[in-house]
């Protein structure tokens, strides 16, 4: 399954929703990617780095704590890093990318727009992840 999660801005619950999806379906061996405009290393248009350790602070650490098999952070220009990101995602059976901009650039099976992450309970979320159709 290929999923893109976007939101209406910062601090809207995107990472929390990604972590819920991962925790509800750990058997999928998710590869999770955070995309942000934060400045990459000096002189580079973007960086794509793998997170190594789970934790409670930092989105990619939270992905691993939720049960993701692998977690990455793409910082900088998404367009510049798109070929490398696609190559990485091609190696993953199931992936989640946290980035509204990525929905226009990546082929995906489902896209979630986070407005109020508490409105969707876990049973509804599981049905959506299992291809059960749209929910409110």
Image: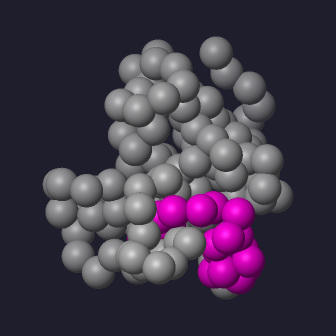
Is 120 situated left or right of 99 in this image? left
Quarter containing the N terminus: bottom right
Q: Main secondary structure of the magenta part?
A: helix
Is 131 situated left or right of 125 in this image? right
Residue 107, image x and y in percent? 82, 58
**Closer to us: 81 or 108:** 81
Q: Is residue 50 above or below residue 117?
A: below
Q: Is residue 121 above or below residue 36?
A: above
**Closer to us: 1 or 82:** 82
Specify the segment rendered in magenta.
70-90
Quarter containing the C terminus: top right
**Closer to us: 41 or 21:** 41
Q: Is residue 9 above or below residue 101?
A: above
Judged from this view, the residue extending furthest toward the front is 43
**Closer to us: 121 or 97:** 97
Q: Residue at x 70, y 58 (%)?
A: 2
The colour scheme is one colour
Residue 130, image x and y in percent? 67, 46
Q: Is residue 71 magenta?
A: yes
Q: Residue at x 25, y 56 (%)?
A: 58
Count of numbered circles in the view: 0
Q: Is residue 62 magenta?
A: no
Q: Residue at x 77, y 58 (%)?
A: 106
Residue 83, image x and y in percent? 73, 77
Judged from this view, the residue extending furthest toward the left is 56
Q: Residue at x 48, y 29 (%)?
A: 9
Query: Can residue 25 be seen from the camera position used here?
Result: no
Residue 17, image x and y in percent? 44, 39
Query: Can residue 18 be seen from the camera position used here?
Result: yes
């Amino acid at each position: 399954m290929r999923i893109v999660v976007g939101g209406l801005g910062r601090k809207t619950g995107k990472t929390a929703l990604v972590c819920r999806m991962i925790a509800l379906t750990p058997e999928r061996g998710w590869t999770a990617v955070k995309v942000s405009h934060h400045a990459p290393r000096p002189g580079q248009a973007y960086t794509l780095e793998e997170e190594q350790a789970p934790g409670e602070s930092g989105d990619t650490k939270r992905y691993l704590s939720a049960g993701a098999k692998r977690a990455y952070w793409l910082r900088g220009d998404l367009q510049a890093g798109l070929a490398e990101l696609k190559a990485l995602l091609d190696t993953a059976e199931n992936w989640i990318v946290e980035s509204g901009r990525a929905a226009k650039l990546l082929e995906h099976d489902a896209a979630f727009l986070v407005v109020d992450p508490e409105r969707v309970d876990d049973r509804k979320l599981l049905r959506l992840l299992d291809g059960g159709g749209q929910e409110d």
